[in-house]
Image (spheres, rainbow, N blue to C red):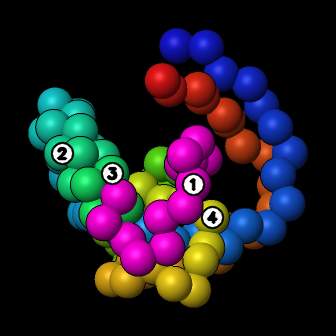
Amino acid sequence: MDFELIKNERNILSGMSIELTTSQNENYGLIRKQWISFNSHLKSQPYNSQNNWVKYGITYKVDGKYLYMTAVPYNEHYVDFETIDIQGGLFARFQHI
């Protein structure tokens, strides 16, 4: 899979998280279902004026648990989304169509 390394500034994102397992196969299924659920939820948001979304898939660790978040840039109008503050740094960017 092609990717590019980019330097990104701080980002505040809104989205939905799930806990990952230790199984790569299980995680593939969980993440796939997460994107389907997230995209459906995103379309139902009251503030849904964008046609071309910039979306993020983020893996992070909290209290020893690995989590995966599907997210878009922060918007205060999104209902039922959690918020995450991503500090700037070097990231891998993948394009998925």
Q: Earlier in the sequence, mark 2 or mark 4?
A: 2
Q: Earlier in the sequence, mark 1 or mark 3?
A: 3
Q: Nearer the viewer, mark 1 or mark 2?
A: 1
Query: In this rendering, would 77 be left or right of 91?
Result: left
What residue would you read off at disc 1? 50
Q: Amino acid at mark 4?
A: Pro
Name the one closer to the observer, 12 or 18. 12
Cα separation, mark 1 vs mark 3, equals 13 Å
User: Residue, x 48% and y 24% (percent of image)?
Assistant: 97
Where residue 17 appears, as percent x and y from the top left, is 33, 66
Q: Nearer the viewer, mark 2 or mark 4?
A: 4
What residue would you read off at disc 4? 73
Q: Tell me the SS state at disc 2.
A: helix
User: Residue, x 35% and y 58% (percent of image)?
Assistant: 43
Q: Tell me the SS state at disc 4.
A: strand
Cα separation, mark 4 vs mark 1, equals 11 Å
**Residue farthest to the top?**
1
On whether residue 85 falls in the magenta region, the answer is no
Q: Amino acid at mark 1?
A: Gln
Question: Which disc, if any, is residue 39?
Answer: 3
Query: In this rendering, would 92 be left or right of 33?
Result: right
Query: In this rendering, would 39 be left or right of 93?
Result: left
Q: Tell me the SS state at disc 3.
A: helix
Q: Tell me the SS state at disc 1.
A: loop
Q: Earlier in the sequence, mark 2 or mark 3?
A: 2
Magenta highlight range: 43-55
What residue would you read off at disc 2? 33
